[in-house]
Amino acid sequence: MARLEVNRSGELEVFVRVVELGGFSAAARACGMTPSAVSKLVGRLEQRLRTRLLNRSTRQLQLTPEGCAFYERGMRILADLEEAERCAGACTTPRGRVRINANVPFGHHFLLPLVPEFLARHPDVTLDIVLTDEVVDILEQRTDVAIRAGPMKSSNLMARKLGATRMVIVAAPGYLARHGTPTTPQELLAHNRLGANYVRARSGWPLRHDGQDSTVAVTGNAQASDGEALRYLALAGLGLVRIAAFQVRDDITAGRLQPVLEDCNPGDLEEVHAVYVGQGGFMPLRVRALLDFLVERVRI
């Protein structure tokens, strides 16, 4: 086969995705191909190069020394190719669709208010926004950027930190007038403690009293699928919630909600990250523009 008949940049991009994502199936989803097609493409690449790039087993793929060298050089080549396209003028302006998945509180308090400014800066970009507190598979959902709160798990995803927030227990003044204000973790047990029903929710509220750490179970008469729903339940006077401080900052200032047990707050922080697939030097300009904008403008 003549060299001009081989889409070498396409082969290289698929191979890089296989390595980054750890398998043919994940790479296939990212590239819009079938796992069989990806496997055959890598096989043809190895045949053409006359060397084995990957050692395959039923559970994992492992780079050979030749494959490792090819991957590292390939990353530089793809980054140089993207830069060349930018310099040529075709990609100097971010354009195209960016699908972003965000948890509901971040979406309401940060992302949606910033959308007009971002689109004013980048009029050729279209945002496809999904708000949910469930952790989605960004490859399966074809998501470019996902906003995730809490500790980052080990994965093949890249991440940029957007900030961190304190957690606070709050209740409406009306609720506290009817039921009293708890001053110790023990007194908290007599109150209606509202929690979240999504899988990644914590099983209890961490507290620190007289130098002792404890966790109070959440056993209220209502649960909700996202943080904003819990905020509304608290505003309605149904009970106490433990929630990100940024969500209720304005409510506390206005007197609609009141912090509870701040002396027992352990001071734990919940970090917020923007996660995405791929190395920092190899991503669409439209995705890079959104990530840079969020890092610049989000103040949690």
Image: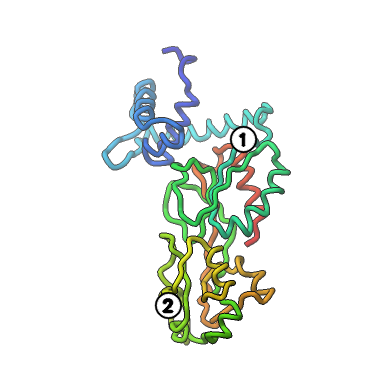
Please state which amino acid type lies under the numbered disc 1: Gly
Query: Where is 264 relative to 168, above or below?
Result: below
- Judge by depth and name the residue closer to the eye, 63 or 193: 193
Identify the mark at residue 262; answer none if there is no mark: none
Q: Nearer the viewer, residue 287 or 188?
A: 188
* Residue designated by label 2: 216
**In this rendering, would 39 be left or right of 102?**
left
Residue at (42% x, 79% y) in the render: 214
x and y percentages locating residue 38 in the rendered image: 38, 30
Residue, x 62% and y 29% (percent of image)?
Answer: 84
Number of the label disc, if any, that sits on residue 96? 1
Residue 102, how many percent across, how many down?
55, 52
Q: Residue furthest left?
A: 58
Left or right: where 151 falls relative to 256: left
What is the x, y in percent for residue 221? Answer: 44, 73
Name which quarter of the figure residue 35 lies in.
Answer: top left
Residue found farthest to the top: 2
In this orientation, which residue lies closer to the viewer: 170 or 79?
170
Count of marks overlaid on the render: 2
Q: Residues within 10 Å of mark 1 (few under 14, many from 20)?
A: some
Report how far apart the C-alphas of labels 1 and 2 lie in the structure: 47 Å
The first of marks 1 and 2 along the sequence is 1
- Considering only vertical position in the picture, is 20 above or below 294? above
Q: Quadrant of the C terminus?
A: bottom right
